[in-house]
Amino acid sequence: MKYEFLCKNPDSKKLIVVFGGFASHSSHFSHLKSDKNVILFYDYENFDLNFDFKAFDELFLIAFSMGVCVANRLLKELNFKQKIAINGTN
């Protein structure tokens, strides 16, 4: 699995976690802007989630297509303020 920050704001303790669908890439989202930190997880060749979410006070989840299934499998222990699943199943 790969991840890349789409937006970084060192003054924000909020993180929007995006789990993309099959063949998602950060370039697909480069036009989006946010005052929050936004990270994209993609390329699910493996399910190694090597990211520390503890640096953030509030977490929000957006998952699309295959990302809905992967996020459900990997993020059960995290407390999200809001979760949005788009066009995917578990």
Image: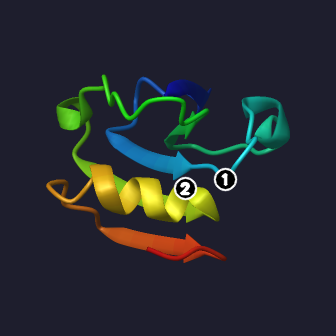
**62 versus 90 height, above or below:** above
Q: Secondary structure at mark 2?
A: helix
Out of 36 and 79, give the one closest to the viewer: 79
> If you read the primary sequence from the N terminus, does the residue marked by circle 2 or circle 1 appear first?
1
Label 1 amino acid? Gly
> Residue 63 lies in what quarter of the image?
bottom right
Whether residue 43 sits left or right of residue 54 in the image: it is right
Neighbourhood count class around disc 1 (C-alpha, 10 Å): few under 14, some 14–19, many 20 upward: many
Q: Residue at x 25, y 35 (%)?
A: 53
Label 2 amino acid? Gly
Q: Position of residue 10 (x, y in %)?
A: 42, 23
* Label 2–label 1 contact, CB within 8 A: yes
Query: Where does label 2 land, which residue?
Result: 67
Query: Where does label 1 land, which residue?
Result: 21
Q: Position of residue 60 (x, y in %)?
A: 40, 59
Q: Secondary structure at mark 1?
A: loop
Out of 39 and 12, give the one closest to the viewer: 39
Coloring scheme of the render?
rainbow
Q: Residue at x 57, y 24 (%)?
A: 4
Q: Residue at x 59, y 59 (%)?
A: 66
Whether residue 38 sits left or right of residue 71 in the image: it is right
